[in-house]
Amino acid sequence: MGNVLDIRNLRDIIDNDKMLEQQLIVNFHSCYHTCIDDLESSLKTNNPVQWRNAAHALKGVAFNLGAEQLGMLSFEAEMASGKPLTHKTPLLAGIKAAYGHVQQALADIK
């Protein structure tokens, strides 16, 4: 399994600007919740396009933050857009668990 969080690259890109880092973290959390809502909705409506789009967006914000494990699970979910619900449901659970690990890692670095 990949790293939970490696924020060094993000810090390099933003030149260790702590205010910007906090704003990006807030944006990450907001995007996560929007994407999870969309993933859950897509399961209820069996909408593979919505599933793929939400997983793709989550993949981007996860990798940008340095949340490799969450990014990889989101990529797996994106690639599984045409799979049955029995395949997607455990992916969603894994994404939620990975997010919990990222939350803890972010709390530890503050």
Image (tube, rainbow, N blue to C red):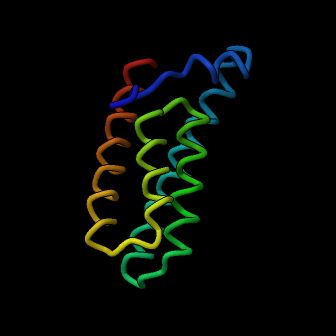
Count the numbered circles shown. 0
Percent of width and height locating residue 102: 39, 34
Name the residue nearer the viewer: 73 or 22: 73
Write the residue at 33% across / 75% down. Answer: 84
Percent of width and height locating residue 2: 38, 29
Write the residue at 59% across / 30% down. Answer: 22
Indicate left or right for 3 with 60 as reference: left
Q: Is residue 107 above or below residue 72?
A: above
Residue 63 lies in quadrant:
top right
Q: Is residue 95 above or below residue 68?
A: below
Residue furthest out toward the bottom: 45
Percent of width and height locating residue 14: 73, 22
Indicate left or right for 18 with 76 as reference: right
Write the residue at 67% across / 25% down. Answer: 19
Quarter holding the N terminus? top left
Percent of width and height locating residue 48: 49, 76
Q: Is residue 61 above or below residue 3?
A: below
Indicate left or right for 86 with 60 as reference: left
